[in-house]
Image: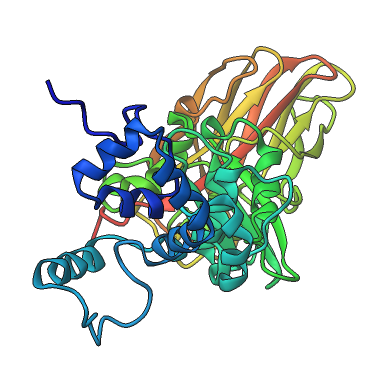
């Protein structure tokens, strides 16, 4: 029975460099068998004599890989036809480690980072450093690089949208950039911006903001109350319902602060049913769309309270046309609410009042369905005033947040 072939893998031969093993494997079998009987003296000699040469050869192989660095012409002249064909195939299908951050030896990464202008943080993991070289570098500062870096801190689908000239939920300057992610995919919001900065993707001089959003049916209805609206938008647009109310198409209230993001003006608190005039303040967190909402708080004696727009004049206020109107309310105690629309002529005379969405609001929840309706504007209508009315009675200190106000012409009605 013949002895097994001595190799570096079967434990019969001492492991040398790739270079020495390759040379040794080319010896006739009889020489390798005799060498085994003498304790691998010849192979050990080759290992000692050619050790450094093996290291050089290994590095050359890593650099060359199966796709050698440099031009594809002229081709190597010293290869036989079969080796030349293998060289051609390898060059087309595989990459040299010199240009592959995913598989290059870790000690090469700082050098590779210099080639693409990337910064490798000392505290970054090996996977993160490879990702920085492959995903940032000269792309740093671009939307794609910022989004890719932010995705490292996300889960699920890793949705990340980079919006220039935005500071959170409000319009910003040329130096402001907001990264928007889904709240359900952002386990640690603080880590989103930290990752972008750590990976070197932040543009110089820019200020980064991070905003999360989560979709609910209340938010979707606020933006897309009719089937026609759904048909006219992509699912990505529908899914982002609730991020900002400024995107609502043709909302007549768009210039009247329907989302209460930075102020409560020009909305006005009003007394209802003999009660005291409530206070209206900005609630900076917890809005159904954007970040903030308008908070109406009852003061003084028990009674009702309300919130009203100024008298609004708009070319889209047309008699006989149908309008979609609504607002979301979130009360701190049980209360009922309705919307009153006071229609006026061009001379500001009151024509009539339409009541919409009368109903009880669920406590500590955003209520939308009972406060949304479609109505026809009466003849001669040219202006309107919209009010949210809590008829009461409610006690002092009772509050309700308002957000996502909408008043829009239904363009599919009436031509």
Q: How is the image coloured?
A: rainbow
Residue 273: x percent and y percent? 73, 24
Residue 223 vs residue 17, the one in the foreground: 17
Camera-nearest residue between 40 and 271: 40
Quarter of the rendering containing residue 4 = top left
Residue 28 vertical position relative to residue 59 in the rendered view, above or below: above
**Residue 130 makes an appearance in the image:** yes
Position in image of residue 26 (x %, y %): 24, 52
Count all numbered tags in the image, as a single digit. 0
- Whether residue 309 is visible, yes or no, is no
Residue, x 43% and y 41% (percent of image)?
41
Residue occupying the far right of the picture: 300
- The percent position of residue 218, horizontal first and vertical second, equals 47, 31
Question: Would you identify the image quadrant in which residue 338 lies?
Answer: top right
Identity of the residue furthest to the bottom in this view: 74
Front in this rendered view, residue 369 or 220: 220
Quadrant (top left, top right, bottom left, bottom right) of the C terminus: bottom left
Q: On the rendered image, what quadrant is the N terminus found in?
A: top left
Is 176 above or below relative to 378?
below
| Placement of 136 over or under 340, stated as above or below | below
- Nearest the viewer among 177 and 397 is 177
Residue 106, position as x, y percentages in the image:
57, 50
Q: Residue at x 20, y 42 (%)?
A: 30
Would residue 348 be found to the left or right of residue 372 on screen?
right
Query: Does residue 320 appear to the left or right of 280 in the view shown?
Result: left
């Amino acid at each position: 029975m013949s002895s097994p072939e001595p190799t570096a893998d079967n434990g019969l031969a001492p492991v040398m460099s790739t270079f020495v093993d390759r040379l040794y494997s080319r010896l006739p079998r009889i020489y390798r068998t005799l060498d085994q009987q003498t304790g691998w003296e010849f192979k050990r000699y080759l290992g000692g004599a050619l050790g450094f040469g093996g290291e050089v050869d290994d590095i050359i192989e890593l650099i060359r890989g199966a796709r050698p660095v440099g031009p594809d012409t002229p081709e190597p002249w010293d290869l036989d036809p079969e080796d030349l064909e293998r060289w051609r195939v390898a060059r087309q299908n595989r990459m040299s480690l010199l240009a592959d951050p995913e598989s290059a030896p870790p000690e090469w990464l700082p050098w590779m980072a210099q080639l693409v202008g990337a910064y490798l943080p000392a505290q970054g993991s090996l996977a993160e450093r490879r990702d920085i070289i492959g995903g940032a570098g000269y792309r740093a500062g671009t939307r794609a690089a910022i989004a890719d870096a932010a995705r490292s801190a996300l889960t699920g689908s890793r949705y990340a949208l980079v919006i220039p000239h935005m500071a959170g939920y409000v319009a910003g300057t040329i130096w402001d950039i907001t990264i928007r992610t889904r709240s359900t995919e952002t386990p640690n919001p603080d880590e989103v911006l930290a990752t972008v900065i750590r990976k070197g993707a932040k543009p110089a001089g820019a200020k980064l903001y991070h905003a999360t959003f989560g979709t609910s049916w209340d938010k979707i209805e606020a933006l897309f109350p009719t089937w026609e609206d759904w048909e006219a938008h992509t699912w990505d647009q529908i899914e982002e319902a609730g991020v900002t109310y400024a995107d609502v198409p043709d909302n007549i209230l768009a210039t009247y602060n329907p989302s209460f993001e930075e102020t409560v003006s020009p909305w006005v608190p009003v007394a209802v049913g003999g009660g005291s005039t409530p206070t209206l303040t900005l609630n900076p967190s917890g809005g159904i769309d954007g970040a903030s909402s308008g908070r109406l708080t009852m003061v003084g004696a028990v009674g009702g309270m309300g919130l009203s727009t100024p008298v609004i004049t708009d070319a889209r206020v047309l008699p006989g046309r149908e309008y979609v109107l609504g607002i979301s309310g979130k009360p701190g105690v049980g209360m009922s609410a309705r919307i009153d629309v006071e229609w006026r002529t061009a001379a500001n005379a009151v024509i009539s009042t339409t009541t919409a969405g009368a109903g009880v609001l669920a406590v500590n929840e955003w209520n939308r369905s009972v406060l949304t309706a479609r109505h026809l504007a009466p003849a001669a209508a040219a202006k309107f005033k919209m009010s949210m009315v809590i008829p009461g009675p409610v006690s002092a200190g009772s509050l309700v947040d308002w957000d996502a106000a909408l008043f829009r012409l239904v363009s599919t009605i009436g031509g």
